[in-house]
């Protein structure tokens, strides 16, 4: 391997989101955002569970990891979830009690809005197409 070979990264598998209460977070990401549970397994060595969720057909997942001092909840995740209809997604989050910002419509930019999960972790929802 030379300096130009890099680490051999071939994709993104899962993005960790620190949460205080895994059950509450699971209910939000599954029931409000509509993500499907891919893995929900105990991790007795470290406590908590390994929970992975993803959009149907998407290879990328999010993992709801127990928050700790070095990885606190309530962060800007940098995640941009895709939705076929931002207004519909916004309405679903409002109905589910989610904290959401206004739907933004700027010329030449996809329709989008910011939202927070129950632990205050921020993400955006961006309309596809």
Image (cartoon, rainbow, N blue to C red):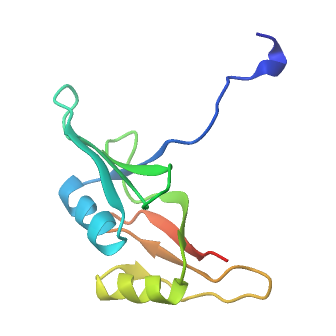
Q: Quadrant of the N terminus?
A: top right
Q: From what the image shows, is residue 110 above or below residue 68?
A: below
> Which residue is nearer to you in this view: 78 or 2?
2
Q: From what the image shows, is residue 8 above or below residue 62?
A: above
Residue 82 seen in the current view: yes
**Could you tell me residue 105's position as x and y percent?**
67, 89
Residue in the picture at 67% in, 24% down: 8
**Could you tell me residue 125's position as x and y percent?**
53, 73
**Could you tell me residue 9's position as x and y percent?**
64, 30
Q: From what the image shows, is residue 64 above or below residue 25?
A: above
> Which residue is nearer to you in this view: 89 or 21?
89
Residue in the picture at 29% in, 65% down: 30
Residue at the front extreme, as displayed: 57
Residue 21 seen in the current view: no
- Left or right of residue 127, residue 26 in this image: left
Residue in the picture at 38% in, 80% down: 99
**Could you tell me residue 27's position as x and y percent?**
23, 65
Q: How many discs mark residues in the rendered view?
A: 0
């Amino acid at each position: 391997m030379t300096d130009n070979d890099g680490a051999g990264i071939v994709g993104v598998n899962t993005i960790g989101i620190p949460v205080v209460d895994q059950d509450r977070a699971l209910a939000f990401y599954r029931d409000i955002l509509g993500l499907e549970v891919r893995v929900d397994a105990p991790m007795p060595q470290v406590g908590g569970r390994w929970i992975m969720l993803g959009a149907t057909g998407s290879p990328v997942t999010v993992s709801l990891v127990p928050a700790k001092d070095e990885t606190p909840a309530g962060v800007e995740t940098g995640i941009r979830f895709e939705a076929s209809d931002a207004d519909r997604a916004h309405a679903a989050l409002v109905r589910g009690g989610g904290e959401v910002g206004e739907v933004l419509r700027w010329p030449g930019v996809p329709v989008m809005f910011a939202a927070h999960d129950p632990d205050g972790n921020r993400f955006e929802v961006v309309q596809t197409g």
